[in-house]
Structures are given as structure tokens and as C-alpha cells.
């Protein structure tokens, strides 16, 4: 069973991201503060859920959360400062947009750049251990999927409505065939077989 609190603070925000490994689109982070002793039978790591389950959970989280917020870092920012720093930036933006400053941040993963003077803890595989991080993983994933589906309408042929910008064979073949867009991360190796061997 996932835990409802780590620090003992009431306004503890779980934070998770989606899209770090993608070739296109923003990296998205979500911050979620849940009620004390919150319980949900289905809520767990978003990667273990079906799309239908994630969409239903999203509605439940938006209704039940004490506070929630989304932060993004653009492909241009990713190219400028690298994906790790851009992920921290998206997380900071999510924390900044909460209804009030969190008392504690619970971060999924093993690294984080401190946010203001707010104490934090990094939890490896936290989305399978804490409800607030699991909720953040659901919101980040569903928000990002929706962004990529919308972009797919304007940039056809890359399959973003299905692959969400991840490095699938279809996506890479489309890059080889059609070239890149303003939403591609040019600092990433988009076509490994074309990488120059020094």
C-alpha cells in the first residue's frame, strides 16, 4: 500500500515528471498535495496503468487534491541547459504554481536542485511508494500526452498522438523522412545510425 506522507508536514507536495526520454515536446512536471490520510484503490505509478485508468485517475486527483500544478520546460530550454536541468526547472515551476508554498517536497528519483528554502527528499521509485508522487506521475503523464496529441494535429506524420514523442521506430523514420520540427530536441541523438563516429 502506498504511503500518504513522508515528512509529517501537512502541505507536502509530491513531484514527478514525464517526457525526459522523448525526442520531441516539453518535459512536464506535476506537483500534488493530497489530503491527510488520503486513500485510493487504483492510484499507483502511472506506468503501471492503462490510458483509461490514468484518465479516470486524473479526474479523481483534480477533484480530491488540496492543491496541484503543472510545470513545463520547452525543447529550446532542454537544448540550452540539458535535460536534467530542464527537468529541475519544470519541477520548480510546478512547485511555484501551487496555491501556496509547500512545506516539503517529495521528489521522484535520486536527484533534485533545491527549491528556495523548502526542504525535500528524493525517493527512488517514489511513484510506487507515495500517493502524492503517484498522483503527480498521473497528472504529468496525462497532461503531456494531451500536449503531444494536440501538437500531432499540426505536425502530422510523426505519430505523436501515439508515441508522445518517444524514440519509436516510426518516430525516427519520420524524422529521417520529413526532418525535424521546432518541437524536436536538437541536442538529443535523433537518428543514432547517422551519428558521426570520431
Image (tube, rainbow, N blue to C red):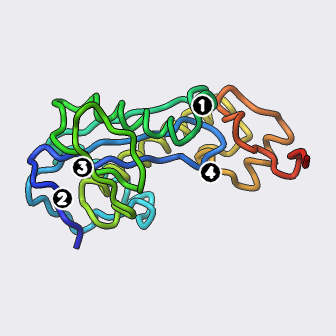
- Closest to the camera, between mark 1 and mark 3, is 1
- Residue 153 falls in which quadrant of the image? top right
Secondary element at image label 1 = helix
Q: Residues within 10 Å of mark 3 (few under 14, many from 20)?
A: many
| Residue holding disc 1 | 75
Q: Residue 6: which disc?
A: 2
Q: Residue at x 25, y 39 (%)?
A: 68
| 44 horizontally vs 179: left or right | left
Mark 1 or mark 3: whose residue is earlier in sequence: 3
Mark 3 or mark 2: whose residue is earlier in sequence: 2
| Residue holding disc 4 | 163
Secondary element at image label 2 = loop
Q: Do callouts 3 and 4 mark residues in contact (Cβ within 8 Å)?
A: no
Q: CA distance from mark 1 to mark 4?
A: 17 Å
Secondary element at image label 4 = helix
Q: Do callouts 4 and 2 mark residues in contact (Cβ within 8 Å)?
A: no
Q: Residue at x 35, y 33 (%)?
A: 92
Quadrant, the N terminus:
bottom left
Tell how many labels. Answer: 4
Q: Residues within 10 Å of mark 4 (few under 14, many from 20)?
A: some
Q: Residue at x 44, y 58 (%)?
A: 51
| Residue holding disc 3 | 61
Q: Could you tell me residue 48's position as x and y percent? A: 43, 67
Q: Residue 44: which disc?
A: none
Q: Could you tell me residue 32's position as x and y percent? A: 25, 45
Q: Residue at x 79, y 43 (%)?
A: 174
| 50 horizontally vs 40: left or right | right
Mark 1 or mark 4: whose residue is earlier in sequence: 1
Amino acid at each position: 500500500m502506498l504511503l500518504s506522507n513522508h515528512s509529517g508536514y501537512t502541505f507536502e507536495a509530491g513531484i514527478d515528471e514525464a517526457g525526459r526520454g522523448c525526442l520531441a515536446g516539453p518535459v512536464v512536471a506535476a506537483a500534488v498535495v493530497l489530503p491527510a490520510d488520503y486513500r485510493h484503490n487504483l492510484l499507483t505509478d502511472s506506468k503501471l496503468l492503462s490510458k483509461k485508468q490514468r484518465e479516470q485517475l486524473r479526474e479523481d486527483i483534480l477533484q480530491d487534491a488540496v492543491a496541484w500544478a503543472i510545470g513545463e520546460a520547452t525543447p529550446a530550454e532542454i537544448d540550452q541547459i540539458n535535460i536534467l536541468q530542464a527537468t529541475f526547472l519544470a519541477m520548480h515551476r510546478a512547485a511555484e504554481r501551487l496555491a501556496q508554498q509547500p512545506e516539503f517536497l517529495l521528489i521522484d528519483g535520486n536527484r533534485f536542485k533545491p527549491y528556495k528554502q523548502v526542504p525535500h527528499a528524493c525517493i527512488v521509485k517514489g511513484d510506487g511508494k507515495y500517493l502524492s508522487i503517484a498522483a503527480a506521475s498521473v497528472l504529468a503523464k496525462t497532461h503531456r500526452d494531451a500536449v503531444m496529441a494536440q501538437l500531432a494535429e499540426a505536425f502530422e506524420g510523426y505519430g505523436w498522438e501515439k508515441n508522445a514523442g518517444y524514440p519509436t521506430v516510426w518516430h525516427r523514420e519520420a524524422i529521417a523522412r520529413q526532418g525535424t520540427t521546432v518541437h524536436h530536441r536538437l541536442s538529443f541523438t535523433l537518428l543514432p545510425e547517422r551519428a558521426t563516429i570520431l
